[in-house]
């Protein structure tokens, strides 16, 4: 198990966690791959990707502990990253684009103009057929990943900054400032609303009915989605909480919190005794201003086969539209794809040596 934290100081921290009677946290590595602060982290059973204000996505092979390279499709701060199993990655950025990546060859299968403003958050449905995104154009958008197109647009009164599917995919939540609206998939209507005193910075589903909420304060609260009531509240840090992360291990629900005080803490939740405060398993002081958080597990439960097939079919559709370019192992990605939505064309970075050489040849011919 590897505890990962990104910070304003452009560094990715890695800590080896050793579970036991007393959990131990041992510094494993620090990596300075970005030229600006880190903004997002995503993990699957093999890879870790980090997004930054330097507009790049860095790739790491955690099994081999090697750096793979970078993806340079976006022209803006990377705001959100999410894997679907071990086959695909979705990325969103301040340029308003959402990209679908094949993680086997790290090819950009689709570059979609998702929002007129920034893409602030995205979430993939457990089936792999749908995705949700929110942006600074005051819209919530549903995407058909099988066909790679927009399926539905909902106008919001304010800009949302977080969106999350529940584990079963039967509901999703949209966060605007200090308010969290819960939607049912069947009706696409609000089934409940949770309002906190401070701005919400991070939310994580613990189960289908329990969601953990953290914000610009020291407390973490667990809410029941059905009643919209707080069932547990505990002080996790001495400063405001930047992000939370959750996973299940050997039947236990583990919650990880990262704060502006520089600490990352791991907690065990007892869902049978919700009124009791979670037990602190371990903590580590990074002495940095943390921005993002994730946990890489050596063995992650595989996604259902039917769900994988759904996403594979999406890849086949995208590949049929434009053949993939053969590349050597992992390289600096430079894909030129046409964007969909709002009638705008995608703009991409061209930094590969081949493109530069072609331009020089054309200039000589002229």
Image (spheres, rainbow, N blue to C red):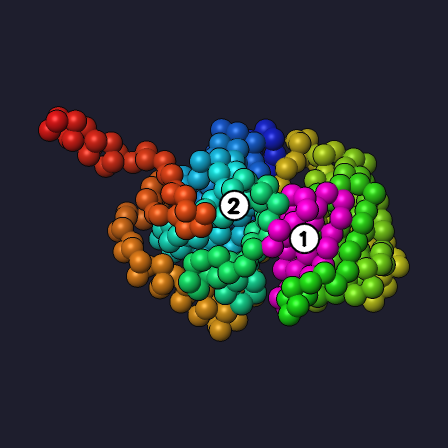
**Residue nearer the viewer, 153 or 66:** 153
In this rendering, the answer to whether 104 lies above or below 239 is below
Is residue 56 at all visible to an observer of this figure? no
| Quarter occupied by residue 69 | top left
Residue at the outermost right position: 275
The image quadrant where one finds the C terminus is top left
Q: Position of residue 270 (x, y in %)?
A: 80, 62
Instruction: Report if residue 309 lies within the magenta region.
Output: no
> What segment carries the magenta color?
154-183
Q: Nearer the viewer, mark 2 or mark 1?
A: 2
Q: In the structure shown, which secondary structural element does the residue marked by tag 1 occupy?
A: strand
Q: Residue at x 64, y 66 (%)?
A: 185
For marks 2 and 1, give the CA distance. Answer: 16 Å
Which residue is situated farthest in the left direction here?
A: 365
Percent x, y of residue 239: 78, 35
Residue 311 in the figure: left or right of residue 160: left
Q: Which residue is mark 1?
A: 174
Q: Position of residue 244 (x, y in %)?
A: 69, 48
Residue 253: which quarter of the image? bottom right
Q: Is residue 145 above or below residue 348?
A: below
Which of the 4 quarters of the picture holds residue 13? top right
Image location of residue 14, percent across then percent down:
58, 42
Q: Is residue 255 above or below residue 66?
A: below
Mark 2 highlights which residue? 115
Q: Nearer the viewer, residue 29 or 350?
A: 350
**Left or right side of 215 for 29:** left
Q: Nearer the viewer, residue 277 or 164?
A: 164
Residue 159, compared with residue 288, is above or below; it is below
């Amino acid at each position: 198990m590897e505890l990962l934290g990104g910070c304003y100081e452009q560094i990715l921290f890695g800590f080896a966690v050793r579970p036991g009677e007393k959990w131990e946290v041992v510094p494993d590595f620090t990596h300075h791959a970005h030229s600006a602060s880190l903004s997002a982290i995503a993990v699957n059973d093999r890879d870790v990707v980090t997004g930054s204000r330097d507009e790049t996505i860095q790739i790491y092979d955690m099994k081999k502990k090697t750096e793979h390279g970078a993806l340079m499709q976006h022209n803006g701060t990377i705001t959100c990253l999410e894997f679907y199993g071990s086959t695909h990655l979705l990325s969103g950025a301040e340029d308003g684009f959402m990209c679908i990546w094949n993680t086997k060859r790290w090819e950009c299968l689709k570059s979609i103009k998702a929002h007129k403003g920034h893409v602030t958050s995205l979430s993939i449905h457990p089936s792999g057929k749908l995705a949700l995104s929110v942006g600074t154009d005051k819209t919530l958008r549903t995407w058909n990943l099988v066909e790679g197109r927009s399926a539905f647009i909902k106008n919001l009164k304010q800009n949302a900054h977080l969106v999350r599917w529940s584990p079963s995919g039967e509901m999703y939540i949209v966060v605007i400032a200090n308010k969290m609206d819960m939607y049912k998939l069947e009706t696409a209507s609000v089934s409940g609303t949770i309002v906190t005193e401070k701005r919400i910075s991070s939310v994580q589903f613990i189960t289908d009915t329990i969601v953990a909420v953290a914000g610009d304060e020291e407390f973490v609260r667990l809410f029941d989605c059905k009643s919209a009531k707080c069932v547990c509240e505990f002080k996790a840090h001495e400063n405001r909480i930047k992000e939370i992360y959750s996973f299940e291990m050997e039947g236990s629900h583990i919650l990880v919190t990262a704060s502006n005080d520089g600490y990352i803490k791991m907690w065990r939740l007892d869902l049978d005794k919700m009124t009791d405060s979670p037990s602190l398993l371990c903590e580590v002081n990074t002495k940095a201003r943390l921005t993002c958080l994730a946990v890489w597990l050596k063995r992650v439960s595989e996604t259902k086969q039917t769900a994988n097939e759904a996403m594979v079919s999406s890849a086949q559709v995208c590949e049929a539209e434009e053949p993939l370019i053969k590349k050597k192992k992992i390289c600096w990605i430079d894909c030129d794809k046409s964007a969909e939505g709002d009638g705008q064309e995608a703009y991409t970075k061209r930094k590969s040596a081949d493109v530069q050489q072609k331009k020089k040849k054309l200039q000589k011919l002229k």
